[in-house]
Amino acid sequence: MALLEVNNLVTEFDTDEGRVRAVDDISFTAETGKTLGIVGESGCGKSVTALSIMRLLPQPMGQVVSGTVNFDGRDLAHLTLPEMEKIRGARIGMVFQEPMTALNPVHTIGRQITEVLLLHKNITAQEATREGVEILDKVGIPSPDVRMSEYPHQLSGGMRQRVVIAIALACSPDLLIADEPTTALDVTIQAQILELIKNLQADMGMSVILITHDLGVIAETCDDVVVMYAGKIAETGSVFDIFDRPSHPYTKGLLSSIPTLETVPKSKLSVIEGMVPGLMDLPKGCRFENRCTYRTDFCQDSPPKLETVADHHHVSCLRWRDI
Amino acid sequence: MTDPILKVSNLKMHFPVKEGILLRAQKFNRAVDGVSFEINPGETMGLVGESGCGKSTLGRCIARLYSPTDGKIEFEGTDITHLRGKKLLPIRQHIQMIFQDPMESLNARHTVGDILEEPFIIHRMGEKAERATRVRKLLDIVGLPSRSVTRYPFEFSGGQRQRIGIARSIALNPKLVICDEPVSALDVSIQSQILNLLVDLQQEFNLAYLFIAHDLAVVKHISDRIAIMYLGNIVEEATGESTYHKPRHPYTRSLISAIPVPDPHKQVNREVITGDVPSPISPPSGCHFHPRCPNVMDKCKADSPTLRRVADHQVACHLDLD
């Protein structure tokens, strides 16, 4: 069952050089109790997608121009601000990449975690403190009652990210959006955090949208995957569709260009030549066309539409049948 | 066998931590605490570890951006540990460095031409016309158009900027290049372009690399040998293949099992280690890894293990690993 349905979302930003379209007509669904991964390189619009869903776009530059975001029967894109505030933090939690900037350095951990509880639940300060300690305990923070009165700078990076997760999960949301939650962390800590998110998800039955550039993280944690490129969806499908039967040249290129522990040392890695086009001067046709090895003249002129490869597996490439 | 190009023995770099009203150094941050290894000509030594393990500090000591507290660095048989001023200049020609963030390591107010010409000016090489030819040649080697000379770093993408950083590092035909996280800030599709370039350059100019990174998959791809660092010490050293297939040290094992594999069919049996890296200002007693080690013994809490040979590995661990 779909918990969140994004339909034809378009997000634009006003910049000094003019209006740019950071997210261009994307649609996807997040199923109840499952993990959806959004993968792509910097600037592909994956974070903007998350911020658009949460209505946290930088104001007044960022605007959702069109499209709908259906969450549990309501369109988040068209809710009033007070209505949205009731959902944000309570029914949808968000975890950001850099825990030091997501936490307020001058407030204690306790104050930051009880803030969300007091805002969304009808409880007393004492009850909130007690619940706060419980949640910190749940995300694996040792001696949580002591930590409540400490400040973010007194914790390590991994512990800070646990606090951010604790705050996001404080009100037992139906959906957790995690934007690069482990990118700033070391691998051993990353393993701990991903394990934690997985366990909490199983425990609380929530859906997760995980945004990352790391295909390893995607393969390990996600059920469904959306691959984004230059503001558009290149390919979407189950994690097995994407890794076993990639149909978009970009997905194929990404998968073969990462060195794994199995590749022969110093062998030539396959590369995707060139670089992502700037959002100011996007090509008229397919956005990947200038880097694609399968390009034809046709690709230059006509933008591809999302076509169906199989059930749930869609690709935006004119030539997917030939390659 | 050829002589090693670089020999590091028992290197220590302790930074004073100034505290109190008088700002006296009461404590020391033991960033690098007794490290020994060798690099042969044309070889890549990978250096892996988590943040704060001292891997960047070690690289900077070897490039002599820092003056080590103790120990010895020999480059082609010459002791360079305490060289200063003009005596360092010929060494700098042979030991160069590539940094993680090219936006910060390239002067934003200089054109690419100025940036690449500077090494030749400092080392008084060639006339102006000859230098210009060399700069164009460098750009060609790293795959940038020659019209780049009049442009500024901000006009380039991250991957191209890293190419400029690489061009600068190989300008003086160095023998050893210290690469400090050269691809960590880059996107996946660009990362493979830069790794290929580094491998090509190594083969063409017989460069030795000290390749510092936290991504074990990247390090294994480019390295002949790998050293794993934990809290200022090397805990294991072996060939890349052997490090991955037969890791001996419990830390190496957990590090390898923590890497997410880009294959949804692989079910990983993870040896997740708990806890964080302790502070190098007050490291744990005995083996620095003992508070997080799944195989900890009483001995580990008291005695600090030294590197010993186990099969074709060097391992610093008390466990019976043979």
Image (tube, coloured by chain):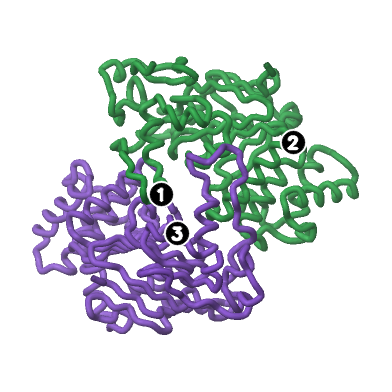
Chain colours: A purple, B green
Left or right of B117 on screen, residue A86 = left
- Residue A306 seen anywhere in this rendered image of the structure: yes
Question: What residue is drawn where x is 12% and y is 61%?
Answer: A125
- Camera-side residue of B262 and B93: B262
Sequence-first disc among 2 and 1: 2
User: What secondary structure is marked by label 2?
Assistant: helix
- Camera-side residue of A47 and B226: B226
Chain at tag 3: A
Say yes or no: labels 2 and 1 on the same chain: yes
Q: Residues within 10 Å of mark 3 (few under 14, many from 20)?
A: some
Disc 2 residue type (three-letter): Phe
Per the image, the residue denoted by label 2 is B205
The quadrant in which residue A56 appears is: bottom left
Question: What residue is drawn where x is 79% and y is 61%?
Answer: B147
Chain at tag 2: B
Look at the image and tell me in which quarter the N terminus of chain B lies.
top right
Q: Residues within 10 Å of mark 2 (few under 14, many from 20)?
A: few
Disc 3 residue type (three-letter): Arg
Which dot, 3 or 1, sits closer to the camera? 3
Left or right of B8 on screen, residue B163 = right
Relative to B82, residue A265 above or below = below
Q: Residues within 10 Å of mark 1 (few under 14, many from 20)?
A: some
Per the image, the residue denoted by label 1 is B263
